[in-house]
Image: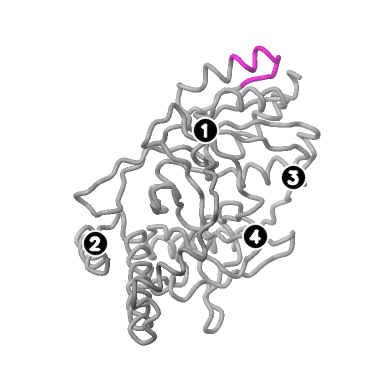
Amino acid sequence: MIVELKKEMVQIIKCIDENNVNDSLFILSKQINLVESLFEYKEIKNEHKILGTSSYLSKQVSQNKPTQTTSFPSDIEKVKINKRDNMYRFERKVRGGFIPEIEAFVPEGIVRKLGLINGDLVFAEKKEDIGPNHYQYTVAEKIGSDDSNERSQFNLCPVEKDGDLWVVTRSQETDDLIKLDNVPYRVLLNHQDIKDLDLQKGDLVDIAFLNNNPHNVKILWKHNIEEIVQQKDLESKNNITKKKKLTPKVVQPITKSLEGQRILIIGNEPHKNLYKSEIEARGGELLWADAKENSQRLRSLVKKSDQVIYLLKVSGHIGMKQVKKFCKQYNVPFENIWDVAASKIIEFGEKNMDKI
């Protein structure tokens, strides 16, 4: 097994490029840990001779063997559709994902490219030319559900230096502080991630952690933003701020313009948290779905909604006809818009209030 791992590691190193460097380094680190564990196992085996004879093993097996066994299908097997052997349930992890049936890791880059969420079904085609446990993934069906109760993710977080510590405290996506139980939370970054990604102060990263273990933070992605561009943007913002000090701008308070409204947004999952904060600030409630989700779930969400906004730019025309049909059936106002900016969504949401 060690020989196979070494060959696979060499192949991964040969295939590293700017598009897969983050995922490749993560996989290599896990493989190195596995190799170390295998060597430790061999040393223990040779030292104690616990597994030295087949008679010992036979004795242990016979002692632990149950008198009768019953085989039940697993939950994962029940999820398979039409018994297609290469269709599997995707499990979202803190970083990347996993397919238990084939013991395959799904890199974060693939998760992002396919827009996968926990519970989605994927096709996995084995790629022997890359390595013994490498697959090409495509979406089979979007039936996953929101895992925000178990896992938190914050995008576009500027990396800060606090003495010897590397931290993030806010998200540029939501333009708000990172909070845990509604309390501002300073996220301490993992030293290994900092080293692997060669992080610098001012870099923008996406992070995630399990809600029951917020101290075990993983960096999901380092955005490719030139440091000089960031510096120019910062200088530009500082100049604007100085001008604003001379002519103070009156900030208008946010009104409850969407009070009691359940707004279903179709598409653009990476900005879901931003839409949620903007809608809730105005007294509304966000419902979200992907255009590729099954019709039963889409129908249920439309039925619960007071209005539906379909983001055509990221969702395409394929699912729009079905969503529009459900809106007509339940007499729910429907809008399809090209702009994905939160301000435009709020604008259309407020206009739709007149139609209700």
Mark 4 surroundings: few (<14), some (14-19) or many (≥20) residues within 10 A:
some
Query: Measuring 39% from the left and 65% from the top, which residue is drawn there?
Result: 227
Q: Earlier in the sequence, mark 4 or mark 3?
A: 4
User: On the rendered structure, is 36 left or right of 209?
Assistant: left
- Check disc 4 and give the amino acid type: Asn
Query: Measuring 74% from the left and 45% from the top, which residue is drawn there?
Result: 281
Mark 3 surroundings: few (<14), some (14-19) or many (≥20) residues within 10 A:
some
Callout 4: SS? loop
Q: Earlier in the sequence, mark 1 or mark 3?
A: 3
Q: Earlier in the sequence, mark 2 or mark 3?
A: 2
Picture coordinates of residue 9, whole percent (x, y): 25, 65
Up/down of 76 relative to 242, above or below? above
Q: Which residue is mark 3?
A: 281
Q: Distance of mark 2 from mark 4, alpha carbons?
A: 34 Å
**Mark 4 or mark 1, which is nearer to you?**
4
Q: Are marks 1 and 3 in contact (CB under 8 Å)?
A: no
The picture quadrant where one finds residue 228 is bottom left
User: On the rendered structure, is 129 left or right of 140?
Assistant: left
Q: Which residue is mark 2?
A: 8
Q: Which residue is mark 4?
A: 211
Q: Which residue is mark 1?
A: 339
Picture coordinates of residue 293, whole percent (x, y): 53, 30
Q: Are marks 4 and 3 in contact (CB under 8 Å)?
A: no
Query: Measuring 51% from the left and 35% from the top, which residue is drawn there?
Result: 79
Up/down of 272 relative to 356, above or below? below
Mark 1 surroundings: few (<14), some (14-19) or many (≥20) residues within 10 A:
few
Picture coordinates of residue 288, whole percent (x, y): 62, 35
Of the numbered discs in the image, which one, if any, rests on residue 155? Answer: none
Based on the picture, tell me whether residue 132 belongs to the magenta stretch.
no
Q: Distance of mark 2 from mark 3, alpha carbons?
A: 50 Å
| Magenta segment boundaries in residue numbering | 325-334
